[in-house]
Amino acid sequence: MRVRPWLAVASLAAAGIATFMALVWAPPDATQGDVYRVMFVHVPSAWLAYLAFVIVFLASVGWLWTKSAWFDSVAVASAEIGVMFTGLTLVLGSIWAKPTWGVWWTWEPRLVTTAVMFSMYVGYLLLRGLSSDFGRRATRAAVLGIIAVVNVPIVHLSVLWMNALHQLPTVLRPSGGPTLDGRMLATLLSGVAAFTLIYLYCMATRVEIEQARRARALASARP
């Protein structure tokens, strides 16, 4: 049974529920009013970036260990999706920063480390285009995919390690439980669930495309 159509339906349903909760059900923030609602997309986008780049790391290890082309397909697919969601995180962060900090961009640790992470994975994708040899390309990319994952904990913990304007973690905190209002937390988690389903759908689609592309390349290379 094909999973992708079911993932598409589940993604749309979850996104609809999350949108209703974010715009209607969740209460206004006592300090920021309705401006904070961008959080319900900004935070899930950041979570997806973390998830995508951890998957790149795992798939890169899988390629180096087994030399299975499937792992390389997963790595490149997840890297592309991760770059997309990291870019969305940066854009939404700037939109949120303007009314709360008064500027679109500031050299703040969380923003800077996220931009560095974005740049490294753009570099990962560019590196893949430097060689036409499949094995060499996949191996070089896998090494960078393993090294670059160090950005994930650095980005998340930067607000704890350095003096930052960015608010401290409210859900994945080093100690204690979430500090959000109950309805806000439920709405945020619904957004995370919806974005995770969207990621899985995008991954299933992109891996299938990558495998089909490689099958055509192999077929055309045969005499």
Image (cartoon, rainbow, N blue to C red):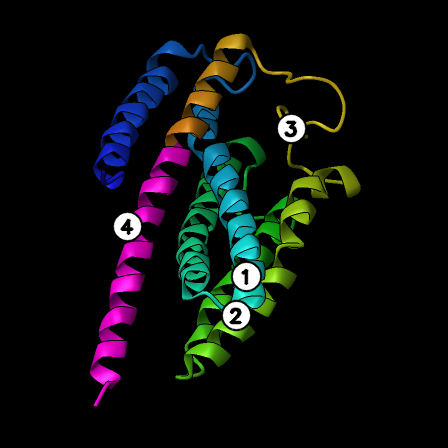
**Total numbered badges shown on the rendered structure:** 4
Q: Earlier in the sequence, mark 2 or mark 1?
A: 1
Magenta residues span 195-223
Q: Amino acid at mark 4?
A: Thr
Residue at the image point whose x is 69% and y is 48% from the top: 154
Q: Nearer the viewer, residue 35 or 154?
A: 154
Closest to the observer: 124 or 21?
Answer: 124
Residue placed under numbered mark 3 in the picture: 172
How many angstroms separate mark 3 from mark 1 (CA)? 26 Å
- Residue picked out by circle 4: 205
Disc with the residue nearer the chain's start (3 vs 1): 1
Query: Nearer the N terminus, badge 2 or badge 3?
Result: 2
In the rendered view, does 27 fall on the left or right side of 103?
left
Task: Look at the magenta stretch and give its main secondary structure.
Answer: helix
In the image, residue 133 lies in the stretch drawn in magenta: no
Q: Earlier in the sequence, mark 4 or mark 1?
A: 1
Mark 1: secondary structure: helix
Q: Amino acid at mark 2?
A: Ala
92 left or right, relative to 1: right
Q: Is disc 4 placed on a helix, strand or loop?
A: helix
Give the residue type at disc 3: Leu
Please tell me how crowded label 3 is: few (under 14), some (14-19), or many (20+) other residues with Cα within 10 Å.
few
Q: Are marks 3 and 1 in contact (CB under 8 Å)?
A: no
List x then y, in percent, for residue 195.
39, 34
Q: Is residue 119 visible?
A: no
- Disc 1: which residue: 60
* Occupied quadrant, residue 35: top left
Residue designated by label 2: 141
Closest to the camera, between mark 3 and mark 4, is 4
- Disc 3 from disc 4: Cα separation: 30 Å
Query: Counting other residues with Cα less than 10 Å from the Cα at mark 1, is it few (<14), some (14-19), or many (20 or more)?
Result: many
